[in-house]
Image (cartoon, rainbow, N blue to C red):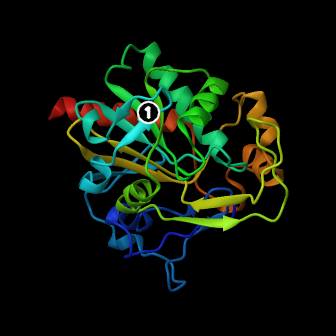
Amino acid sequence: MRFRPVTLGRAAGVLTALVLTAAGVAGCGGGADTSGPTGGTPDSGNAPEAARTVATGNTLDQPLPAAAATTPLTDQTGRHLTLGSLRGRIVVLAPLLTMCQETCPMTSQNLHQAAQAARRSNSSGKVVFVEPTVDPARDTVRRMHAYAKLYGALPNWLLVTGNPARITAMWKALGVTTEKVPVDEPVRDWLTGKKVDHPYDVHHQDVVVIVGPDGRLRWITVGRPDARGTRLPTSMREYLNDEGRDNLAHPAAGGASSWTARDVEEAVAYVCDLAGDG
């Protein structure tokens, strides 16, 4: 996948606020970029004084947009839900594309590890990790179920899909833009082993967002997932293309921002403490 730049001022203010404080952004499979829509460098001096760094991300205090909270979703087990229905728990969100060969397998690896850590600390009832697809046309419940099995199913790790138009609107409300683009290189489906007819990719920002139990956006980071030192499922490791293998080995190459499972765990702990203080 190629880098998908953040468009300031067009999507919801979530990523806009982040870009003002972040060193750069990385799209799915792409490098770092610090330019806005006119090619200028975002001025970190314009960032709200209340924003501060927790782990590798930035704190937020914004309501979860209604379009995101109310989107009907279905997880890998066929259960129906909305993000709003998870109110009362900390929700960790990141985009997913099961046909991604560049970064999504590492995103899932990191979130799966963070979900395991939450279970070990007996806090899985308070925290849920949700990966909504950016490719609902292909990411059926069956595919999501098979993908989850590669990593090891966890009750607090949900892979969700839904109506394509509603899913796109949900991500747009969160400031994440998506774009379907054709792929010239031949692709074989990791699930079936068959050549994919008319392959395409879905460009998007690589972002992790944490929603507090009060339904407010509390933390965000943009960058490549750093899964070094972990073991990807064999099918996913073999499915990575050259760019994906390079991202796995060198997630911060070219000055790109990156984040680890531990960063997410620390951010979850911050949000948990914040909820307790409230």
What x and y, as percent, mark residue 40? 51, 83
Residue 25 in view in this figure: yes
Vertical arrangement, residue 88 with respect to residue 182, above or below: above
In the displayed structure, does residue 163 sit left or right of residue 49?
A: right
Q: Which residue is mark 1?
A: 129
Residue at image coords 63%, 56% = 28
Q: In the structure shown, which secondary structural element does the residue marked by tag 1 occupy? A: strand
- Tell me which corner region of the image, top left, top right, bottom left or bottom right, holds residue 248: top right
- Viewer-nearest residue: 194 or 132: 194
In the displayed structure, does residue 206 sit left or right of residue 164?
A: right
Vertical arrangement, residue 49 with respect to residue 262, above or below: below
What x and y, as percent, mark residue 195? 83, 48
- Viewer-nearest residue: 188 or 4: 188
Vertical arrangement, residue 3 with respect to residue 208, above or below: below
What x and y, as percent, mark residue 199? 74, 58
Query: From the image, which quarter does the C terminus lie in?
Result: top left
What x and y, as percent, mark residue 144? 57, 35
- Viewer-nearest residue: 205 or 138: 138
Residue 3 in view in this figure: no
Taking the view exactly as shown, the residue that stands out farthest to the front is 197
- Viewer-nearest residue: 79 or 121: 79
Residue at image coords 79%, 41% = 239
Residue at image coords 54%, 59% = 205
In the displayed structure, does residue 265 sit left or right of residue 212?
A: right
Q: As shown in the figure, which amino acid type bears the numbered disc 1? A: Phe
Task: Assess disc 1: are there few (<14), some (14-19) or many (≥20) residues with their C-alpha within 10 Å of its C-alpha.
Answer: many
Vertical arrangement, residue 248 with respect to residue 122, above or below: below
Residue at image coords 50%, 69% = 6
